[in-house]
Each structure stands twice: as structure tokens, then as C-alpha cells.
Amino acid sequence: MKWYSALLKLLLEESSTQDKHFTEIRSELADEMLNLYKAILKYVVKSICAYYRNQAFEALRKLAKADDWNESLGDVISAENSVRAMSGDYGTRQANMYLGGIFNLQLSAAQNEIMQKLCVTDMRAEMDSLERRKDHLLANSYNWILETQQYENFVDWHHSNRKRLLWIRGGPGKGKTMLLVGIIRELMAQQDTHFDTPRLSYFFCQDADTRLSTATSVLRGLIWMLLQQERSLLCHLDTLFGNLGSKLFEDPNAFDNLKAVLQNMLEDKALKRAYLVVDALDECKDAESGRCELLALISKISETNCKVKWLVSSRDVPDIARSLKENNVRTALSLEAPSIADSLKVAVNAYIKFKMSGLAERFIDDLEEECDTGENLVKVQGIRDAVEEAAEALRLRADGTFLWIALVCKQIEETKCGPDKVLGLVHDTPRDLSGIYDKMIRQVVLKTNLYSNECTRVLLITARAYTPLRLSELVTLAGFNKLTPHRNIVKSCGLLTLREDDVVYFVHQSANEHLNKDLESGLLSKASPLGHAEGHRTIVLQSLHAMEEVLERDIYGLRDPGCMVSSVKPPVSDPLAPIRYSCLYWVDHLCEMETSLEEVGLRNNGRVDLFLQVHLLHWLEALSIFKNISSAIAAMKKLGNLVSVSSCSLASDRNFSIG
């Protein structure tokens, strides 16, 4: 009884991991235990009664076999055997359940590892960030393509299976990205309201960010987002990842491996239908990352897989035009075609109204702080008239370019001009993007403000940076002191914008391109004779200085050199945050300097040599905290190559001088 009482507590213990089937089994087992208790108690009671009866009477009962003791004992044994059998089966099932749970946890951990290694960035958050940087997403700026049947190519793509690829093309600032964001939002809304809607995966290429500007990154992003919605497709990655690990996503063959994975996923029966969206294909670098191969893959899938629809955008560049040429399954929509001029005009006018209404409200708010109520009525109407006049001038000069409007409004905001100067500023603004960028650079280089030198340095650094910089990283690379008005300097550069999370971006990819051209032959090239190399040189020297100042042993004070990096949490005031970019990329910029390598001292106790002598392990520790030790391996190889080249060059110079 004591044994079974203890066993009962163990077997019938509730567990949050057990499902309803175990609840039913536990109930049946409890009934069997109860039957056993009844049989035992019946036998015990019967024995006690027999013990206390009159012995003569008990003898007569034995003679008459009134008490069948064998049968009573058999009932107990039978009940006990039944409990043993059921509890054994229950224990086996429970053990299997726990083992299955452990296996599922291991499987889940393996899948999570694949997803983490595969992920380039969460493109859902990236799209939200794009919206904030590019301005508020107005329904009128994209719904023209959704609410009309006159654009046959879009209708064929969206509502039928006749066309499986739609290429939206147009010049810089024509609203391609925001149009795709609007269409994606519409497709997402359909997913929320309709059963069995297609899976949706999208990727926004960005040339200014090396993470988002390669063909391999595009495939990784599309695959990752598909797997977020259909985990069963992970089977197409399991074996490859088991054999290659992270190399699957990073080595020179990564594109070919991922291309096969994506094709297999899209052909899998578990995937019913899919929309794949890629924005700014022209910002996917060609020579370095195989844009041609990506275009070939997109074309092939559009022709061979009827479950998949592609939506892509880009400028009208030759290699993309050749690969995405219209045929029986591919179609195109030009944002500069006369047939859509009226629709775009409505969208542009809605954007101008939105921007200028905000400007008028700001002027009115400023006015209310200065004047009495009686004076306001007249002045408010004057403000509205002045802003409307400026808005009309914008409509006449915008030429369907959303970016041009945004840049004009940005200048109005940054110059702090009043309503009386708005119209003049609009008329003084060049009518093309190149002219606006020239004007912004001229304001920086010709020292029209007190911080022109600092602004020039910022432009040089951002033009050469491999990824968008956080403000703290930019301050480090520019060598600003604590009293320098960092935010104001960034805003004064014109071509840059500062996001809410303190990341510095170009106002548009075309601004980055124009700045690089100017470094070749424009005003900035005169201010910085070394051009591109000047930016790389500044980054290298400032990075070395900052890392020497910050890096030290056990920088987070962990006091546990063997701890897992996944468990490391940065302190509230992270000493590595301002030098993160420097740690990751200083060697890459060193390789780009092209000249004056001896200035940074690769050998013989030079600057780089001394840094590595003192801080090599500290630098490696920082990279391990960033979970980027692979960068250290690649960087050491590059440094070795630089030293070899430098040694050969030095030997050649000596031989020449001796000769």
C-alpha cells in the first residue's frame, strides 16, 4: 500500500508538457489503482473479521469453504498485475514523450541556428525604416496602380497568371521604392484577410550597405522570409548546413548553393504560391556579387515555375533591360511613360499637398507664439496663400520626381526661412537632382557655415564607409571632440539624414553616387586632393587612434575568459559601440588606401605594427564579442598580403637605388 501510494503520486503528477491524451491515460490508471486499493482493503477487512470471529464458527466456515481466500487473493494479484501493466505502459509513453520533447527541442535549436546564420537582416524592420527615411507612405502615392484597370501589364501580373514577372523601372527619385512598399502592404493586407493566400518574401537592395547589395544577400533574404512563413521548407537547407555550416552562406560558392536551395523550395509541394519582390536591382553590384547571375535566375524561375510571381524594380540600365525583356511571361511598367503621366501627377500633387500642409502648420504655430489673436487671422491667411503659391511652383517644377520635392522641403526646413522666402527658395532651387546636390556640396566646400571643414570630413567618410554609420561611429572616425555639435553638422551636410536610431544615411542612393563623382572631379576633389583615398586614410588613422584609446583586456569586465559569447551582454554604456565600425573594417580601408601605406607603418614598429603588438588580442576579443571572429581571420590574411606587397615594393625600390 505504501509503495503504490508513492507510485501514484509520481505517475499521476500533472505536467505542462503533457497533452490531453495523457490526461485520459492518467484517468484510466487512477481507476485501476482504485480497484487495486479496493481489492487489498477487501482482503484485509476479510482477514480481520476472520481473526476476531469465534474460532468454532470460523472452523465451520472453513469446512463449508464459505471464505474463498484464494479467489480474494487472486483478485488482489489480478488488480496489481493490471496496475503494473498499465503503469509500465504509461511510463514508457511518458518517457517517449520526454525523449520526443528533447528531440524536438534539439531540432528547434538546430532550425533556429540555421535561421540565425541565414539572416542578413529582418527585412520587415528594414521596410519600416525605409518608410521613415523616405517620408510618410501616402496611399495616394501608390494606390493609383491598384485602383485602376487601365494598366494592363499590372493587372495581368496581379490578377491573372498570364504574366509572372513585372519589372517597374524609372529614374532616381521617381518613387519606385515607395510604390513597391505600397504594393507589399496591400499584399500583406490580403494575407491577413484571405485563406490560403500566397507566401510573400521581399528584399530591398541598398548600394550604400554592403550587407544589402549582393546577389547572395538577396537570396538569403528571400529564403529567410519564406522560411519564416513555411518552416517545413527548412528540409532543403538541413543537409547543406550540416555539411558546410556558416560557409553555406559566406564562401565563394554561396550563391550557387543558395540558388539551388531557392529553386527547390519554390518547387516544393508544401509551397502553394509565392510573391517574391526585389527592389532596386541596379543597386545590387554586378562585378562583385553576380547581378547577372541573379537576373538569370529570376528570369529562369519566372519562365519555369507557374506558382511564383516576381515584382522587381530598378533604373532602366542595359543589363537589367536585356535580362528582363518582355515576353509571354514577363512585362514591364515605366514610371516615365506618357500613359501613366496623369496618374503620377495625382500622386505627386498629393505628396506636395502633404509636405506643404505640414510646412504651413509649422509657420502658423510659430506665428501664434508671436502675435495676438486679432493679428493672427490676417497673417494666417497670408501664410496659407504664400505656401499655396510655393506649392504651385513645386508642381510646375517637380517633373514627377518625389525626391526633388523632398529635397526642396528639406532645404526649406534647414534654412529656417519664413513664409515670405519660401517661394523664392523654390525658384532658386535647380530643377534636377544633380543641380540640387551640387548646390549642397557647394555650400559645404565654400565654407558658408562655421563647420564647413567638419562637414567636408563627414562627407568624405560617409562616401567611403561600407555600411551606414551610427552617429557615435561617425564621431569617432571624424575625430570630433565632445563639444562639437555632431547632429547639426550631419544635418548641415545636406546629402545626409539622421534616423531616429542615430544611424546616418544618404537622403537617396543618387546622392551617394553624385558625391562619389564629385570626389573624382568636382568641388570636393579640389578640397581633398587624394579623393577617395583621403576618406580611407582618415578612417584608418582615426580608427587606429580610437582603438588604441579604448581597447583593453576583458573590456566588459566578465572575468570569465571561457564564457559563451551568446551569454555576453554589453554594459549600459558600451565602450565598444563608438569603435564597432573601426574594429570591423579598418583593415579593409587600409587595403583601399592604394598609396602611402608606409605612412601607417605596416612593419618596423610603424603605426599598424605597434597597434598589433599591443592590441592584437584585445582587438580579437572585441571581434568575438561582436560575434564576428571570421572578420578577424579575413583581416589577418589581408594584412599578410599587404606586408608581402610592401616588402616586395621596398626591395624593388632598394634595388633601383643601388642600380
Image: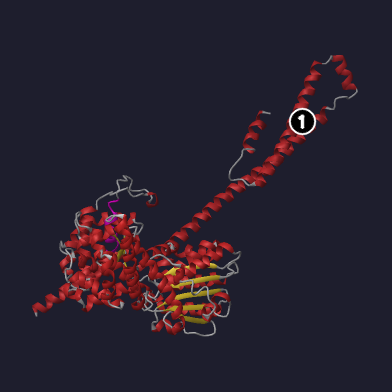
Name the quadrant containing residue 463.
Answer: bottom left
Main secondary structure of the magenta stretch: helix
Residue to which mark 1 is pinned:
39
In this orientation, which residue lies closer to the viewer: 419 or 173? 419
Residue drawn at (21%, 79%), measured in percent from left and top?
521
In this orientation, which residue lies closer to the viewer: 65 or 408? 408
Q: Where does the N terminus fall, quadrant-wise?
A: top right
In this orientation, which residue lies closer to the viewer: 557 or 639? 557
Name the quadrant containing residue 549.
Answer: bottom left
On the image, the x and y values in percent for residue 287 come to: 35, 78
Residue 73 visible in the current orientation:
yes
Badge 1 amino acid: Ala
Residue 362 visible in the current orientation:
no
Name the quadrant containing residue 585.
Answer: bottom left
Q: Relative to 148, is 354 on the left or the right?
A: left
On the image, the x and y values in percent for residue 36 come to: 74, 33
On the image, the x and y values in percent for residue 58 come to: 85, 18
Neighbour class for label 1 at 10 Å: few (<14), some, many (≥20)? many
Q: Which residues are magenta?
A: 574-586
On the image, the x and y values in percent for residue 547 come to: 23, 57
Q: Relative to 643, is 151 on the left or the right?
A: right
